[in-house]
Structures are given as structure tokens and as C-alpha cells.
Image (cartoon, rainbow, N blue to C red):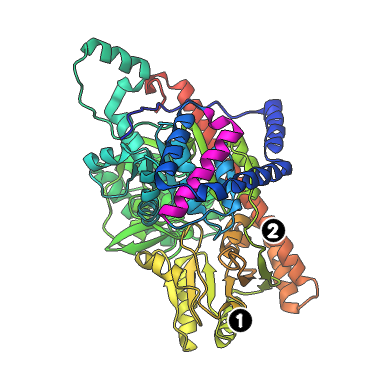
């Protein structure tokens, strides 16, 4: 086991003004197209080292691997020749131990990450092996290396699959997952390379910070150890610190979930608040949208009118407690009205065992351990007439955006990164490097289709699925919500077609459903395929009839998420087809496009005007750009707030946590 302890770095504040402009130019230079060509040449030189290595006896290969490990420990990984030789040896070890021979594009990805870049590798291009090769290189340095992925299933799968390779190369592999006891976690963190989710890594980091208290500063720890005069102290922390991270599905974890807070909290009974929220929920029927308040869908905000304020005063005239404070009473009603307007079962949450379970809007996965800010979660529970849970008292919190900036060395990979290349550089200092596919992509993209009404769109999707099914090909339909997936499944069942539904209420069958999605006549409906992590392999004969067909049932707020869905077909040179369906009533337009523009689009679509589809495409792209700009501004505001708090609250401790 490794004993090196790594303290997190103190990230520099974000660049502003002229500095930000200069920094953006540096970022563009660091991800210039020529670098892909350079990596291609480096990978070719690495590939050329393979023939003589295949003739080595086992003991000879072990000896060469040991020499490479010593070179890495001495810091020679920065020398291109040393990096190429080490990677070539690891490639041969992987071929012998786990039966996979890395393609040149996988060598490119490993070289890119070894140099601190973000490799954009298409779905099905072998990111698991690429991460494994890079993890060994980082593990050889002696510093703790974390491989971050999106769920516990992939954590355990990848750790188990790559463990023989790491052990062959003299390293220990570990993994942390939900439900592990602290003692077992500490043992797993003792390994050179540890697999885990961002949630588990960040939570353990916060627990260690709470446990260490004011002694988390390295200088104070050294003084404490000197005062102990050699006496052993019990090790109360779990992790070995934050040094190196390889982030899989980096756009999902570093961008989409960037401002999601990881919170360590404790439940605190608050009967007055609970009663007030239940009362507010009961009052919502008396408030009429447009008369008493306005619901701002884009920002999910409630704004009271003068008539609404008057009505509220009348409603609470005889009440006491929290209702006596005007600002507090308005906040309670805003929470209740927000729950009614912006939080819907099957979209933002599901109900399991009489509990509200938040659904990740980017991955479609349930998040049973998370809750919305104080009051909102209880307002949703009141809306559903469920038992009201006790509010949480926050003990420690950190956004994933801030957490990943604490690593001293950060790299990653994803299938969709170029749209957010500027943000990756601006926030994390990661330059995006596109890696070509091993075989040419022969995906067919059909023209997008838009309809005036939601019902017309669903009818068209059903007709298209029936057509594809009749031809014997498999089809994967991507939806944005649980409600949409269930609605579509019900419609197809009325047509006599059996469907396999993957959403937040059926998460346990995820890997099996995704893996089988390439079988003949298979109909798979999934909410947000981002980060599923399981390849869809085509059954024999499917390639001859066009491969997997992918249908997008609704545009996402990010074009990256749409591309992730399309990337599920036409992998590794297989054929495939992708197409999108939309309507003027889709949430993306209702939130980010003005009412007059939507009405104009609806009229044009109803009339069948020649330019209606082009107008729809322009409006959807405009809506996505607007959504992404607002999401970026929100992420930047939260990061700047984190930086301000860290610099201003001196009593928060030397690291500002």
C-alpha cells in the first residue's frame, strides 16, 4: 500500500477583465488543432515499439516495467521518450493480462491525460482501458490517484476489471462505494489507484475536514507531530489527500453537476417550519397565476403582484409564529408556489416509499441522499401529501466545481467536450484535445422534425418506432423525464410493442437494459443517456439493416447532451442512424424563447409554411445557447462566491472549508 499523503492545493481565483482575455488566448493555444496531430505522431511512435515487446519473456517484461516505474518516480515522465516507452510497456502488459490491445487512438488519449489534458473520445472508443493505462502511470508516481466515474456500478466494474493490470504493474487497486464502513474506506484509500464517484470522494474529503478540525493545515500537523515526540497518533482521516484525478464523463461531472453542492448535514426537528410549510401548501389554491403572482419559468422564480401581497396579508392576518414576519411569509408562499409550478413528479423527482427522491436532470438517475434547500424539499413533500421530513442543519458543504479545483493534477475524458472547451480551460485549466475515432464514423443524421403540439410529436415518434421495429432493427428513444418515458412506453404498448424502460424508477436494471439495446427489434426508452457507461453492442445481422436507430424525443438545454445520445449509435465503425423530434410546447422553448416567437413558430408549423422547420431549428439552437450562457453565469457566480467566502471568512479555517 502507498503511504504518500497529499494536501489539496489552493486554487487561484478566476481571471477577470484583461487577464481573462489573455488567459482565453492561452487556452486556445493549448487546445490548437496541431496538438492532435502531435499526439497522433507520438502514438505512432509508441505503437512502433510494440513488436519487440511481444517477444519478451514474462520475467523480462516485469523487469522492464520495474525500470519504467523507477523512471516515473524520478520524474522522467516529462521526457517524451520515457513516457512513450512506459506506455508501450503498459500496453503490452494489458494485452497479456486482460486481453486488450490498445488502439493508437487509445494511446493518444492516455498521452493527452498524462499531460493534464481533457481527451474528447467518442462513445465506444475504449475509455476504460485508456483510463487504466493512465492510472498506472499516475500510480507509479506514488501520489494518490482517484479515478472518478458516474455511479457505483461502474466504479466496481472498472476497478475489478483493471485490478489484474495494476497488480501486474506493482500497484494496488481500490474502490469506494456507498454503504462502505469507514474502516473499509480507509483500507481502500490506501491503494495507489482508487475508483469512486464524485459524491463519495467529496463526502469523504468533507468528513476528513470535519474530523481534523483546525489541525488540517500541514504546518500545524507537523508541529503537532513534533510535540508528540515520536508517539504514534491514531489516524482519524480516511483519504490520503487530493493529488491526482482522472475524471470520466468529465462534461457531466465538471460542467453539468459543477454547482451541485455536496453537503454533510444532520437532521434538526423544526416543528414551526414544518407546520408553516404545510399551511402554505394549503393556501396555494387561493393564488391565481397572472393575478396574484407571475411564474418566471426561465429562472424558476415566483414574483408577487400587489394583489398577491394584499391577498397574502389577508390570509395570514390571524396567524402567528413565522407568518408574522412579512418577508418570511412571502418566502414560505414562494416555496409552496415554486413546488407547484416548477417541480413535477416524473421530472424533477419521483416518490419512493413515501419519500421524495430528487432526479438528476442531466443523467436521469435518482439521488436519494440529496435534498433541496431548506424549505423547498418540505414544500414538495407537502404538495404530494407525504410525511414532512425534518430540515437539515448543514455541517459542511462544497460544490463539485470547487472540489475538483483542489486536485493538484487533473485530467479526464468524455465523448462531448468541445462545446464547453472555454469553460474547461477558464475554470479548471483543462485544455480539450479531440481524439479521432479508431474507425470512420458512418452515422446517418436525419433532418430534425418539429411539430406544433406535444401530442403530434408523440404520434410521430410512435409511427417512426413502429416503422423501425417492423424492419427488425433496434431503436433507442431518449427522453428528458420519467413522465415522458412512461407516456411513450404506454403509447407503444397500445400498438402491441413491448418496451424496455430505463429511468429513475428502474435504475437497478440499467446495465442490463443498455447492454441489450442492440438486439433485433429491441425498443429501449431511456431518460438522459448521459454517462450510462455501458456500450451498446449490435447483435449479428443488425449492421446489415442499418444498425441501432436513436431517436431524441426532446432537445436538451445543452447540445452536448444531445450529442451524447446520438453517440450511442454508430460506434467502432458500425452503421447507425439518429434523428430528433420536437414540438413548440417543449420545455426548452417555453423557458428560453419569448412567447411571441413561440406563437409565430406554432402558426408556421400549423400552416405548413416552407420555412417552418428552419425557423424551429434556429429557435431551438438559440434556446440552447441562452440556456448554456445562463448556466455558465450561474456556475461562475457560485465559484466567485466560494472564492469570496474563502478569502473573507478568516474564522473558517486556514483552508477555508
> How crowded is the residue under tag 2: few (<14 C-alpha within 10 Å), some, or many (20+)?
some
Nearer to the camera, 507 or 161: 161
Q: Quadrant of residue 563?
A: bottom right
Q: Is residue 645 left or right of residue 40?
A: left
Q: Is residue 107 left or right of residue 534?
A: right
Disc marking residue 124: none
Residue identified by numbered label 2: 621
Q: Is residue 537 above or below residue 163?
A: below
Who's the residue at 59% across and 85% down the image? Answer: 467
> How crowded is the residue under tag 1: few (<14 C-alpha within 10 Å), some, or many (20+)?
some
Nearer to us of marks 2 and 1 is 1
Dominant secondary-structure state across the stretch colored magenta: helix
Query: What range of the chain is rendered magenta?
Result: 76-98
Q: For the residue labelled by badge 1, is the local secondary structure a helix, a strand or a loop?
A: helix
Q: Are marks 2 and 1 in contact (CB under 8 Å)?
A: no
Question: Where residue 1 appears, x then y in whole percent?
Answer: 30, 35
Magenta stretch: includes residue 81: yes
Who's the residue at 48% across and 22% down the image? Answer: 647
Magenta stretch: includes residue 209: no
Question: Where residue 325 appears, x then y in whole percent?
Answer: 38, 39
The residues bearing labels 2 and 1 have C-alpha atoms spaced at a distance of 32 Å
Nearer to the camera, 181 or 243: 243
Question: Where residue 292 appears, x then y in whole percent?
Answer: 51, 55
Residue identified by numbered label 1: 545
Count of numbered circles on the image: 2
Q: For the residue labelled by badge 2, is the local secondary structure a helix, a strand or a loop?
A: helix
Who's the residue at 24% across and 10% down the image? Answer: 227
Q: Is residue 628 above or below residue 552?
A: above
Q: Is residue 441 above or below residue 88?
A: below
Nearer to the camera, 238 or 1: 1
Question: Where residue 539 appears, x then y in whole percent?
Answer: 50, 76
Q: Which of marks 1 and 2 precedes in the sequence? A: 1
Amino acid at each position: 500500500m502507498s503511504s504518500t499523503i497529499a494536501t489539496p492545493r489552493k486554487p487561484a481565483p478566476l481571471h477577470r477583465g484583461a487577464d481573462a482575455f489573455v488567459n482565453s488566448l492561452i487556452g486556445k493555444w493549448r487546445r490548437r488543432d496541431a496538438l492532435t496531430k502531435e499526439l497522433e505522431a507520438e502514438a505512432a511512435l509508441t505503437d512502433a515499439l510494440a513488436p519487440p515487446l511481444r517477444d519478451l519473456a514474462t520475467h523480462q517484461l516485469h523487469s522492464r516495467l520495474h525500470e519504467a516505474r523507477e523512471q516515473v518516480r524520478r520524474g522522467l515522465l516529462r521526457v517524451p521518450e520515457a513516457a512513450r516507452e512506459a506506455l508501450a510497456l503498459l500496453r503490452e502488459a494489458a494485452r497479456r493480462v486482460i486481453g486488450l490491445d490498445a488502439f493508437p487512438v487509445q494511446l493518444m488519449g492516455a498521452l493527452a491525460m498524462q499531460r493534464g489534458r481533457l481527451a474528447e473520445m467518442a462513445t465506444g472508443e475504449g475509455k476504460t482501458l485508456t483510463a487504466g493505462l493512465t492510472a498506472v502511470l499516475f500510480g507509479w508516481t506514488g501520489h494518490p490517484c482517484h479515478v472518478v466515474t458516474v455511479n457505483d456500478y461502474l466504479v466496481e466494474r472498472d476497478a475489478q476489471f483493471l485490478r489484474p493490470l495494476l497488480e501486474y504493474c506493482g500497484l494496488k487497486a481500490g474502490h469506494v462505494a456507498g454503504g462502505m464502513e469507514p474502516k473499509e474506506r480507509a483500507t481502500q484509500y490506501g491503494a495507489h489507484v482508487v475508483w469512486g464517484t464524485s459524491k463519495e470522494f467529496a463526502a469523504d474529503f468533507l468528513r476528513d475536514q470535519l474530523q481534523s478540525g483546525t489541525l488540517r493545515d500541514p504546518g500545524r500537523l507537523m508541529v503537532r507531530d513534533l510535540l508528540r515526540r515520536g508517539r504514534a497518533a491514531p489516524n482519524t482521516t480516511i483519504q490520503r489527500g487530493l493529488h491526482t484525478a482522472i475524471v470520466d464523463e468529465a462534461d457531466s461531472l465538471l460542467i453539468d453537476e459543477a454547482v451541485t453542492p455536496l453537503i454533510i448535514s444532520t437532521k434538526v426537528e423544526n416543528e414551526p417550519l414544518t407546520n408553516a410549510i404545510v399551511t402554505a401548501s394549503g393556501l396555494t389554491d387561493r393564488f391565481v397565476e397572472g393575478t396574484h403572482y407571475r411564474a418566471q419559468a426561465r429562472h424558476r422564480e415566483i414574483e408577487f403582484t400587489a394583489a398577491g401581497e394584499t391577498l397574502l396579508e389577508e390570509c395570514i392576518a390571524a396567524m402567528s409564529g413565522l407568518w408574522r414576519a412579512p418577508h418570511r411569509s412571502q418566502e414560505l408562499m414562494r416555496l409552496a408556489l415554486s413546488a407547484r409550478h416548477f417541480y413535477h413528479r416524473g421530472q424533477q423527482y419521483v416518490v419512493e416509499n413515501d419519500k421524495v427522491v430528487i432526479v438528476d436532470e442531466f443523467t436521469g438517475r435518482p439521488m436519494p441522499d440529496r435534498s433541496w434547500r431548506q424549505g423547498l424539499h418540505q414544500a414538495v413533500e407537502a404538495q404530494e401529501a407525504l410525511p414532512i421530513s425534518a430540515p437539515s442543519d448543514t455541517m459542511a458543504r462544497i460544490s463539485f466545481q470547487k472540489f475538483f479545483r483542489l486536485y493538484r493534477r487533473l485530467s479526464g475524458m468524455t465523448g462531448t467536450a468541445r462545446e464547453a472547451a472555454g469553460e474547461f480551460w477558464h475554470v479548471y485549466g483543462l485544455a480539450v484535445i479531440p481524439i479521432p475515432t479508431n474507425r470512420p464514423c458512418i452515422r446517418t443524421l436525419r433532418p430534425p422534425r418539429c411539430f406544433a403540439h406535444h401530442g403530434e410529436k408523440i404520434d410521430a415518434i410512435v409511427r417512426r418506432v413502429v416503422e423501425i421495429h417492423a424492419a427488425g432493427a433496434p431503436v433507442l428513444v431518449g427522453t428528458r423525464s420519467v413522465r415522458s418515458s412512461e407516456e411513450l412506453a404506454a403509447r407503444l404498448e397500445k400498438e402491441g410493442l413491448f418496451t424496455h424502460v430505463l429511468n429513475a424508477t428502474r435504475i437497478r436494471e440499467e446495465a442490463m437494459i443498455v447492454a441489450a439495446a442492440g438486439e433485433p427489434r429491441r425498443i429501449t426508452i431511456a431518460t438522459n443517456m448521459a454517462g450510462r457507461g455501458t456500450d451498446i453492442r449490435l447483435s449479428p445481422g443488425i449492421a446489415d439493416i442499418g444498425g441501432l436507430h436513436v431517436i431524441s424525443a426532446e432537445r436538451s438545454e445543452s447540445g452536448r447532451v444531445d450529442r451524447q445520445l446520438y453517440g450511442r449509435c454508430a460506434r467502432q465503425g458500425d452503421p447507425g442512424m439518429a434523428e430528433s423530434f420536437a414540438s413548440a410546447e417543449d420545455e426548452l422553448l417555453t423557458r428560453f424563447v419569448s412567447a411571441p416567437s413561440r406563437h409565430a413558430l406554432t402558426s408556421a408549423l400549423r400552416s405548413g409554411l416552407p420555412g417552418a422547420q428552419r425557423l424551429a431549428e434556429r429557435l431551438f439552437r438559440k434556446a440552447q445557447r441562452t440556456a448554456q450562457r445562463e448556466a455558465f453565469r450561474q456556475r461562475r457566480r457560485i465559484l466567485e462566491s466560494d472564492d469570496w467566502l474563502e478569502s473573507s471568512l478568516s474564522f473558517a479555517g486556514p483552508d477555508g472549508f
